[in-house]
Image: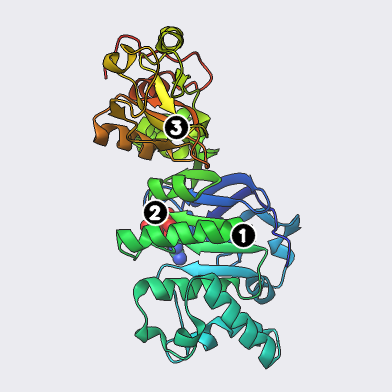
């Protein structure tokens, strides 16, 4: 497999004729294997910036380096063959089969038939399509989502060190769009290509990007940062407006339950003296003891009535429901708490053992303080 390339924009500007610059002194670096998203309002120059990378648009001044090498010194046709390119309208050749479409660049490079056929099937499987079923069809016989997958397969055909994706999922309905985004991220985790991805949708940028370049009209870079940094420290009012008033909530999509400084529940097992359980509860942020089985899995919350006996007995009065997965996205975990109408719930590891408690108060504290490591509040005053 080819190694992914680094990409650098170095003081890049673009003017058409005597007009004002549509790209103005653009400088940023993309690490090998990272997804860099260019995002901004319509006409800000995203597509122009991207097309200068494969020289479909010529650079007026400055330079773009791929793997440290200037694109200006490369033969444009050969450069394009080395760069995967996916666009919104896919641009499949209508009179060629799916196999023929995916094989376009390998054919240009003179691969032999067997190698091409094997690569086509491998790529179809990679993007979640059945080779038997798809190989001989024509683009018109596919759904929009399937065509887009073929577009991605075609761009990956010669395992390019760099991929350019211009609003690749823009024309797809929201449900399939989300599916394609997830599939692409799964693919990327495996392939680790360097990707430049254009979108006008900030939510898509936050989801897909390792780094995001937010651009303003005139091709000016407003901020270049990781999604988390962009949301917590927008550089100016333009970025703040662009990421939206709900940026605090958006941050919850970037965090996992395991990133939070969770509460430590008073854990008790069947047969233990209730006095010990009470004492543990008195020292915890959570007012009620949590009954667990021999493997540490949550069985239920103990009520006052449960604690009136000598020893702890199963089952507990109230079930431990919901139970939250440590690896869940924080936004989904909060949704679970709100949906269940509960203030807090046990968090478990992949084996189902309790590792802590997540509460609405912890999430709200996180949203207002923005600091994950700070001492969290307790639930002592709240009654379940
Ligand atoms: N060939 C051209 N000649 C003159 N101006 C052009 C040309 N191509 C693009 N522009 C101008 O350059 C600016 C940037 O266009 P570009 O397509 O890069 O924007 P964009 O951010 O990708 O927009 P959108 O989100 O609407 O696709 C626009 O003002 C556009 O009108």
Q: Please identify the quarter of the rendering in which residue 120 is found.
A: bottom right
Question: Does 194 sit above or below residue 2?
Answer: above
Does the numbered disc 2 mark a residue whose Cβ is under 8 Å from ligand 1?
yes
Residue position for label 3: 347
Question: Does 57 sit above or below residue 201?
Answer: below
Decide if residue 16 is in sight here. no
Q: Residue at horizontal 72%, vertical 59%?
A: 70
Front in this rendered view, residue 7 or 345: 345
Disc 2, SS: loop
Q: Which tag, 1 or 3, sits closer to the chain's start?
A: 1
Quadrant position of ligand 1: bottom left
* Label of residue 190 in the image: 1
Foreground: disc 1 or disc 3: 3
Disc 1, SS: helix
Decide if residue 301 is in sight here. yes
Front in this rendered view, residue 53 or 351: 351
Foreground: disc 2 or disc 3: 3
- In percent of width and height, residue 301 lies at 34, 24
Q: Which tag, 2 or 3, sits closer to the chain's start?
A: 2
Q: Residue at horizontal 55%, vertical 56%?
A: 196
Disc 3, SS: strand
Q: CA distance from mark 1 to mark 3?
A: 29 Å
Does the numbered disc 3 mark a residue whose Cβ is under 8 Å from ligand 1?
no
Residue position for label 2: 43
Q: Residue at horizontal 50%, vertical 31%?
A: 296
| Side (left or right) of 30 relative to 49 | right
Q: CA distance from mark 2 to mark 1?
A: 34 Å
């Amino acid at each position: 497999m080819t190694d992914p390339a680094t990409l650098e924009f170095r003081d890049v500007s673009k003017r058409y004729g005597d007009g004002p610059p549509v790209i103005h002194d653009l400088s940023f670096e993309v690490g090998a294997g990272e997804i860099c998203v260019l995002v901004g309002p319509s006409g800000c120059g995203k597509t122009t910036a991207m097309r200068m990378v494969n020289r479909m648009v010529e650079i007026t001044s400055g330079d773009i380096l791929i793997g440290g090498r200037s694109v200006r010194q490369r033969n444009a046709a050969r450069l394009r063959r080395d760069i995967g390119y996916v666009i919104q309208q896919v641009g499949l050749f209508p009179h060629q089969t799916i196999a023929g479409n995916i094989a376009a660049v390998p054919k240009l490079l003179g691969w032999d038939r067997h190698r091409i056929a094997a690569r086509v099937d491998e790529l179809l499987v990679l993007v979640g399509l059945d080779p038997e079923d798809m190989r001989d069809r024509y683009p018109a016989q596919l759904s929009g989502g399937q065509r887009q997958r073929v577009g991605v397969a075609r761009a990956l055909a010669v395992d390019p060190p760099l991929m350019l994706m211009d609003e690749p999922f823009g024309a797809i309905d929201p449900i399939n769009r989300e599916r394609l985004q997830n599939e692409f991220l799964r693919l990327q985790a495996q392939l680790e290509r360097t990707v430049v991805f254009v979108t006008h949708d900030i939510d898509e940028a936050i989801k897909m990007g390792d780094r995001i370049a937010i651009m303003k009209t005139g091709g000016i870079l407003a901020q270049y940062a990781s999604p988390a940094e962009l949301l917590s420290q927008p550089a100016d009012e333009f970025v703040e407006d662009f990421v939206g008033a709900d940026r605090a909530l958006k941050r919850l999509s970037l965090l996992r339950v395991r990133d939070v400084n969770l509460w430590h529940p008073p854990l008790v097992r069947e047969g233990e003296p209730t006095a010990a359980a009470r004492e543990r509860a008195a020292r915890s942020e959570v007012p009620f003891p949590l009954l667990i089985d021999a493997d540490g899995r949550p069985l239920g919350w103990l009520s006052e009535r449960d604690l009136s006996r000598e020893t702890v007995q199963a089952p507990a009065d109230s079930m431990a429901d919901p139970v939250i997965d440590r690896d869940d996205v924080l936004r989904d975990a909060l949704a679970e708490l709100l949906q269940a109408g509960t203030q807090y719930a046990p968090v478990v590891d992949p084996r189902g053992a309790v590792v802590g408690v997540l509460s609405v108060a912890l999430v709200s504290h996180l949203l207002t303080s923005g600091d994950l490591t700070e001492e969290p509040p307790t639930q002592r005053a709240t009654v379940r």
